[in-house]
Image (cartoon, helix red, strand yellow):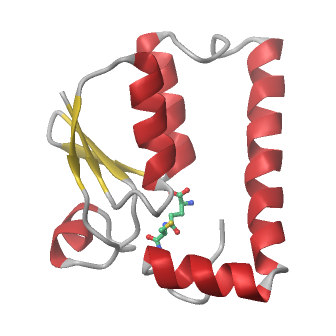
Amino acid sequence: MYTVVGTTKTRTARVLWMLEEMGVAYTHEPIPPHGSRVAELNPSGKVPVLIVDDTAISDSVAIMTFLADRHGDLTYAAGTIERAKQDSLTQMINDEQMRYYGQQPATVSFFHQTAGCRKSRTP
Ligand SMILES: N[C@@H](CCC(=O)N[C@@H](CS)C(=O)NCC(=O)O)C(=O)O
């Protein structure tokens, strides 16, 4: 059983969406970053965090890669050229998305307000 920690207005939505697509059972703790519960799980205080068998895994892309590999779903197999291309595309989209947000003061301000995120951040 998985527990997903983080509110839906954060990158936690990526993990929740994936679990829904895969039809995998989970529980959800919709709590914002930097609370004491999150700090216990992830020293950076950031969400999402996935709890698996009492182990906390942080970072949305790492969590999604783990889930895809573990369930053999929504991914190419590790160690294949197709997977390398998939990972390249994932990293590029992740970087460019955050660069885009960073160039849009109104967007980034809205994002930070709604997500409860700090103003300085990196992907
Ligand atoms: N690379 C991490 C970034 C996590 C992250 O920055 N999460 C935001 C919410 S979307 C957060 O917790 N922000 C609090 C902070 O920046 O201190 C991921 O993809 O999970």
Image quadrant holding the N terminus, namely top left
| Residue drawn 51% across the image and 86% down it | 118
Give above or below for 94 relative to 105.
above
Q: Position of residue 40 (x, y in %)?
A: 19, 68
User: Which residue shows up at 48% across the image and 31% down it?
Assistant: 18
- Point 23% across, 32% down: residue: 26
Q: Measuring from the top left, give residue 2's x and y in whole percent.
A: 23, 33
Please state the horizontal and vertical placement of residue 23, each as a whole percent of the image: 36, 17
Horizontal side, residue 41 vs residue 105: left or right: left
Asked where in the image residue 19 lies, by quadrant, the reply is top left
Is there any visible trace of residue 117 in the rendered image?
no
In the displayed structure, would residue 86 be above or below residue 88? above
Q: Quadrant of residue 25?
A: top left
Query: Is residue 107 depicted above or below 91 in this figure?
Result: below
Q: Position of residue 16 (x, y in %)?
A: 40, 40
Q: Is residue 65 visible?
A: yes
